Amino acid sequence: MSNLIIVRHGQSEWNALKKFTGWVDVDLTPEGKLEACKAGELIKKTSIKIDSYFSSYQKRAINTLKLIMNTIRIDPNQIIKAWELNERHYGKFTGLNKDEMKKKYGNEKIHSYRRSWDMAPPPLNKNSQYHPLNINIYKDINQDKIPDTESLKDTYERAIPYYKKNIEKLLTQEKNIIIVAHGNSIRALCKYLFELSNNKIWELEIPTGNPLMISLNKKLKIEKCYYLDDKRKKNLLINI
């Protein structure tokens, strides 16, 4: 038996401002830091020994994982960072307020962009300060791999190959893994793990800072799946 713990980062500065964030590298709010510390306490109570620690390149995920690791008394230098686990790129919507966009384009249109499987927002101009090409943490990524915009399908097509290559092999060795990532990269992971259809995935909500515990057998079939904080859980859309 192996355990995969997936955590969406704690509340970020742009979460609080209701901005489309995507690949912009914003940090946690004080509330987000508290969520991360609470996630660490919940994980500590399980008494599970974690063997590997993965996060995206983005500091809201990295700092969430660092706070979790500090809480369970593990050296945060062990973090493995992967840009493939980054949040979905929101293209031209990046930096804009979600409520204002709903007023401008209508709730249904914005909901379609946010929740559809293969609809991407208009591309972000490469000269924008918010474009990943102009953000220092992405300088070591091949420019051909850096997107101007992404759908959830695009996010899936970078996150899942990384997961299969680097994380599944550890799970087959009965290792316990934690991944701290983002709403949409986690939705992509859950689509794969839960075998959700393109039409079903839009219903999946991922709460911030609430560890999702997934126990897998030797064939990587899910035996148990639940949120550690039952009061903040969301419907997982999976029957076990």
Image: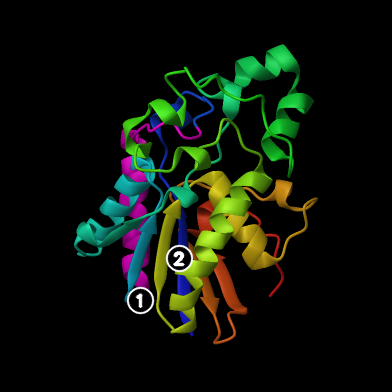
Residue in the image at 32% along x and 32% along y: 136
Question: Which mark is on residue 132?
Answer: none
Left or right of 74, for residue 27: right
First of labels 1, 2 by sequence position: 2
Q: Position of residue 197 (x, y in %)?
A: 78, 58
Q: Is residue 166 above or below residue 187?
A: below
Residue in the image at 35% along x and 76% along y: 48
Q: Is residue 80 above or below residue 45?
A: above
Gap in angstroms between the C-alphas marked 1 and 2 = 10 Å
Q: Position of residue 209 (x, y in %)?
A: 43, 49
Residue under pointer 2: 5
Residue in the image at 72% along x and 46% along y: 202
Which range is magenta?
22-46
Q: Is residue 129 above or below residue 136?
A: above
Residue under pointer 1: 48
Q: Quadrant of the C terminus?
A: bottom right
Q: Nearer the viewer, residue 156 or 212?
A: 156
